Image (cartoon, grey):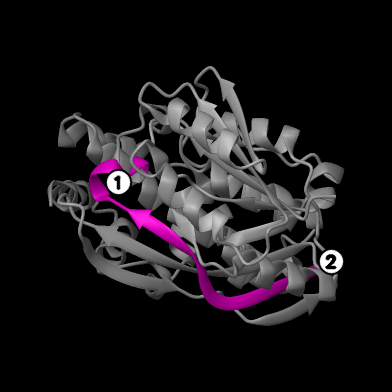
Amino acid sequence: MTKVSVVIPVYNMEKYLDRAYNSLKNQTMADFEAIFVNDGSKDKSGEILSRLEKEDERVRVITKVNGGVASARNTALDAAKGEYVFFLDPDDWIEPDTFSSLTTAADSEKADIVMFGVMSEFFGNDGNTVKRTVTHTPMEGVFRGEPFKKYFDRLATNYLVATKMIRREFIEKHGCRFHLKNIGEDGLFYVSVYENNPECLVMIDRPFYHYFVARSLSLSNSYHPERVNDNFYLSEAVRSAVEKWGLMNSPMHLKTAYYATVRDLQIGIKNVSLGNEPIKKRRLWLKNVMKDEWVKKSVKSVSVSMAGNRNDKIKLILIKLHLYFAVMALSGINQKK
């Protein structure tokens, strides 16, 4: 059996494919398959992938009609044959000893999932690196039993799938696949994994993964009209996991579910602010959202210190004070910046 199946969705990524592939070719452990799914690219991505497939027998290219990143990843999962699954976006790259380090840890501990750090590489419009930041793992070591239940407050919203290598047998046993969302599909897949209680989790606090960040290209900085009326699907999945476990009476689990809701609320505010609606209509959106009892409880229960950056903290204070116009005004200013 192939050791690692690398899932790589591709849409118009001609500028970056060679870099991503080279980081795979340079791996110290050669036993992997790289499944590139060409999701209806209109640039030269298809030509590049055809060349790579001819040059390296470990490269598999699947061409399909455009269906989005979730659909492309599901196509790759359906075709995967490896013992473990690793997710790589085509504009990112990994350290040369990534597969050897992760599989050694997974094999020795019989882990269902291995988590690791990520280095975010911020690039300006001129293509030069602006800064680098490292996101560490919430913990480090080997955790057995039902680690996601036990450490739910630390693990529940660590959504990025690119920082996880998962045993494929576990994925298939529980039918884990990506929901067809344009944003947040990572988190929904991650929740579908941990709600089924992986028995062994290994966390290695080292940034094996390099995450390319270009503000102008980011989906998280684009307006998603579908989220206006369906904004809380990710936090609802987190809450559903807690309900599935029968732990809604656990203060820690409940607090974490509340936090996930507030996190979605902040994303929703940002999304609405990226649209073209007048501020009065954006305020009305927030006012209507805040009529929901669960959202109200979440805002009341989550402390300001738990919010993300300074702006999120200020917005949470304003929401708690029901100053919805001020929230939207501040968010609008932030998006213009």
Lateral position of residue 119 relative to residue 216, left or right: right
Chief SS of the magenta region:
strand
Can I make out residue 128 in this image? yes
Residue 186's x, y, as percent? Answer: 56, 47
Lateral position of residue 299 relative to residue 332, left or right: right
Report the span colored magenta: 200-219
Front residue of 255/193: it is 193
Residue 332's x, y, as percent? Answer: 17, 46
* Amino acid bearing label 1: Lys
The magenta stretch spans residue 211? yes
Look at the numbered disc 2 and give the secondary structure of its residue. loop
Front residue of 310/134: it is 134
User: Residue at 28% of width from left, 35% of height from top?
Assistant: 284
Look at the numbered disc 1 and give the secondary structure of its residue. helix
Can I make out residue 297 in this image? no
The magenta stretch spans residue 85? no
Lateral position of residue 147 relative to residue 268, left or right: right
* Amino acid bearing label 2: Glu
Q: Quadrant of residue 133?
A: bottom left
Residue 58's x, y, as percent? Answer: 67, 44
The correct choice, above or below, for 159 with respect to 200 in the image is above
- Reading the image, the residue beneath label 2 is 199
User: Residue at 23% of width from left, 44% of height from top?
Assistant: 216
Residue with the most extreme bottom position: 141
The correct choice, above or below, for 52 with respect to 239 in the image is above
